[in-house]
Image (cartoon, rainbow, N blue to C red):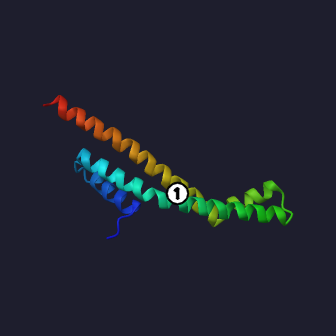
């Protein structure tokens, strides 16, 4: 199975749903993999954003008002994909922040109980 952002997050979601413990090192390892894969997602976001901007510019050049162009663009599939891609990147960034905190807390817990 190919390792993707979706497969990494999905495997953790499954373990969380089944209340299986996840060691701190696995949180950190998953975070490192997600960060490594994030570059492609950022590139994808830039491409989608450019397409959305081109669409808006084209509509304005055709004589539509800026407000009308904005409404038309926001109703498009490209704009929906743009929002989804933005949310995906933010989810990964939040995952990484929480993973660091989780690993830190688990490490402190380990050392305090030793």
The residue to which callout 1 is attached is 42
Report the side of 106 relative to 41 (left or right). left
Residue for point 40% across, 47% down: 95
Report the side of 14 relative to 66 (left or right). left
Q: Tell me the quarter of the image containing the N terminus.
A: bottom left
Residue farthest to the top, as pictured: 112
- Residue 84 in which image quadrant: bottom right
Depth check, front residue: 15 or 53: 53
- Residue 101 in which image quadrant: top left
- Residue 110 in which image quadrant: top left
Residue for point 58% across, 62% down: 81
Report the side of 56 relative to 61 (left or right). left
Q: Residue 44: image x %, image y %? A: 54, 62
Q: Residue 2: image x %, image y %? A: 35, 69
Residue for point 23% across, 36% down: 107
Residue farthest to the bottom, as pictured: 1
Q: How crowded is the residue under tag 1: few (<14 C-alpha within 10 Å), some, or many (20+)? A: some
Q: Tell me the quarter of the image containing the C terminus.
A: top left
Residue for point 44% across, 45% down: 94
Residue farthest to the left, as pictured: 114
Above/below status of 89 relative to 106: below
Q: Residue 103: image x %, image y %? A: 29, 41
């Amino acid at each position: 199975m190919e390792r993707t952002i979706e497969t990494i997050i999905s495997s953790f979601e499954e373990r969380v749903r089944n209340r299986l413990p996840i060691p701190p090192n696995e949180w950190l390892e998953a975070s490192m993999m997600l960060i490594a894969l994030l570059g492609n997602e950022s590139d994808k976001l830039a491409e989608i954003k450019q397409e959305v901007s081109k669409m808006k510019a084209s509509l304005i050049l055709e004589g539509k008002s800026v407000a009308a162009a904005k409404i038309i663009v926001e109703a498009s599939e490209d704009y929906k994909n743009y929002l989804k891609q933005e949310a995906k990147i933010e989810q990964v960034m939040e995952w990484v922040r929480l993973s660091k905190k989780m690993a830190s807390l688990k490490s402190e817990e380990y050392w305090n109980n030793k």
